[in-house]
Amino acid sequence: MLEKLKQLDEGSLVEIEPEQRVVVVGDTHGDFNSSQKIIDEFLDDSTTLIFLGDYVDRGSASKRNVDFLLQQKLNNPAHVYLLQGNHEGYPWLKFNPVDFWKNLDKAEFKFYKEVFQELPLVATFKNVIALHGCLPDIESLDSVNEIKEGSENWRRITWGDFSERSFLQGIRPQFDQDYFERKMDDFNKNFLIRSHQPNCPSKMFNDHCYTIFTSSAYGGQKTIALIDTEKKIKKENITIKQF
């Protein structure tokens, strides 16, 4: 599996040319049933699926969930994209609880660390950016390919939250609307779809920032984003759907 993922050579930034529809999936956190349902319902030749990371920990079926999604990626490399979340980054920034990582033996730990290193950090299509947490402080999206695991910009992408003010201390940096708008202007994009914050409003910053969460691990509503890419992407073409 690792060698096959390396052969895909997607880099840290994937630029996608979707067919007719993009479905973006938030944290699944060991919720194998939700992952399977999404694949069964949405995976077809006209749909691109983007999973935003956090496949492990919290839920009861982490290994089954992530192995299933990795196999879907290998089976459908042009239609399934798996990004890194913070729970894939445990080897570079320790945190708790991590039931998946702490139940691995040494060989398994090394294997999943190397597998997750192959996953991209950011996906983009048309005027949309998709990632796990927040936007990195770089001048252009091409520079995502230069971001190293454990670095400040890696932490922004995998750990960053949005709030009313920016606050960079602590493991979860927070960023406000001014930062969001400045970086979206730098990247010449209009919409961000992200996950990571289960209790965050689904729409923020004049409906240009969308937050979804797709795991049952937190007990709240599970959501995904549906985007019609046959039309120019506007607010009305992005649907947040309970799943």
Image: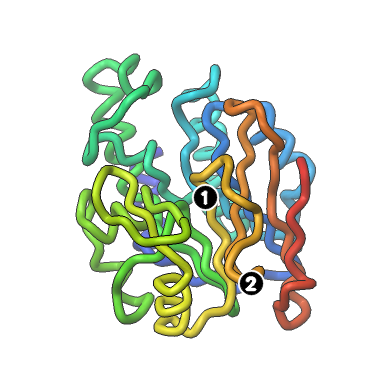
Q: Earlier in the sequence, mark 1 or mark 2?
A: 1
Secondary element under disc 1, as helix, strand or loop, is loop
Residue picked out by circle 1: 52
Who's the residue at 39% across and 18% down the image?
Answer: 99
Quadrant housing residue 243: top right
Q: Residues within 10 Å of mark 2 (few under 14, many from 20)?
A: few
Q: Nearer the viewer, mark 1 or mark 2?
A: 2
- Residue at the far front: name it: 164
* Front in this rendered view, residue 196 or 182: 182
Q: Looking at the image, is 181 positioned above or below residue 13?
A: below
Picture coordinates of residue 8 (x, y %)? 41, 57
Left or right of 13: which side holds 48? right
Who's the residue at 54% across and 49% down the image?
Answer: 195
Left or right of 147: which side holds 51? right
Who's the residue at 55% across and 29% down the image?
Answer: 65
Q: Residues within 10 Å of mark 1 (few under 14, many from 20)?
A: many
Quadrant housing residue 217: top right
Secondary element under disc 2, as helix, strand or loop, is loop
Picture coordinates of residue 112 (x, y %)? 33, 33
Q: Amino acid at mark 1?
A: Leu
Q: Amino acid at mark 2?
A: Asn
Who's the residue at 36% across and 22% down the image?
Answer: 97
Residue picked out by circle 2: 206
Quadrant housing residue 193: bottom right
Are the two marked residues, 1 and 2, in contact with CB atoms closer than 8 angstroms?
no
Picture coordinates of residue 211 (x, y %)? 59, 54
* Front in this rendered view, residue 101 or 170: 170
Q: Looking at the image, is 214 positioned above or below residue 20?
A: above
Quadrant that contains the N terminus: top left
* Front in this rendered view, residue 213 or 124: 213
